[in-house]
Amino acid sequence: MLLIIPLAVIVFIERRPLVLSGLGFQSRGVVNDSLLTLKIFAALVIFSVLFSIALSFSGINDIGKVEDAVGAIFSYSPLWLMYFMVVRVFAEEFFFRAFLVPRIGVMGSSIAFAIAHLGYGSVAEVLGALVLGAILAIAYKENRQIVPNYMAHLLYNVVALAAFLQA
């Protein structure tokens, strides 16, 4: 749905041709794209570390609910993990950044991204998704490139998953 709805809106409601470069699928070269990916990834990690510290002091750290959900994914087929790590991240970046940011702005897409994370049942996850979504939305708005956002989001999820496995 995260892919079908935007494509249907663009083609059938907005009646615009489906031009991939208009959705952020252009490159500024491997080096520039890689540097942008690392810059976005660093912003995500720095925020997460600061947010984790703040949660520890505030007493609202309910991130264990997310760990339970991630653990449940491991009880399924490894294909589910691949889906969540690769396909789902791409669909999220396409929907929340390439599609929503130009239509409802950084805050609107960030709020929608946070709402999409309500299923974890964690206040910390929703608040974190709100700010991480804003970081990704700002990066998309400034650069109009979806691939560095996707790669940074994917790297972030891999690091978060590794951290959950270590805990």
Image (cartoon, rainbow, N blue to C red):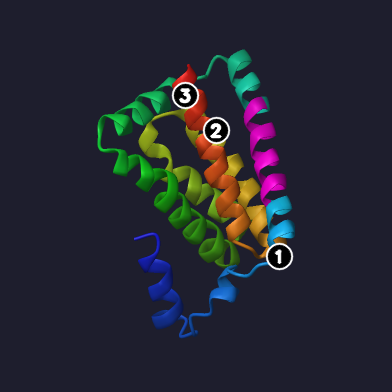
Circle 1 residues within 10 Å: few <14, some 14–19, many ≥20: few
Magenta span main SS: helix
Q: Which residues are magenta?
A: 37-49
Report, in whole angstroms, how far the alpha carbon at label 3 lies from the one at label 1.
33 Å
Asked if residue 72 shows in the view, the reply is: yes
Residue drawn at point x = 73 percent, y = 57 percent: 31
- Residue 75 drawn in magenta: no
> Measured along the vertical axis of the image, is residue 82 above or below residue 48?
below
- Quadrant, the N terminus: bottom left
The first of marks 3 and 2 along the sequence is 2
Three-letter residue code for mark 2? Val
**Does the CB distance between marks 1 and 2 fall below 8 Å?**
no
Residue that carries the numbered disc 1 in the rendered image? 29
Residue drawn at point x = 56 percent, y = 49 percent: 110
Q: Tell me where residue 160 appears, x and y as whole percent.
A: 52, 31
Residue that carries the numbered disc 2 in the rendered image? 159
The circle on residue 164 is 3
* Camera-nearest label, 1 or 2: 1
Q: Residue furthest left?
A: 76
Report, in whole angstroms, how far the alpha carbon at label 3 lies from the one at label 2.
9 Å
Three-letter residue code for mark 3? Phe
29 relative position to 60: left or right: right
Residue drawn at point x = 49 percent, y = 48 percent: 113
Three-letter residue code for mark 1? Gly
Q: Tell me where residue 64 appears, x and y as whole percent.
A: 43, 20
> Measured along the vertical axis of the image, is residue 100 above or below residue 12?
above
> Measured along the vertical axis of the image, is residue 22 above or below residue 150?
below
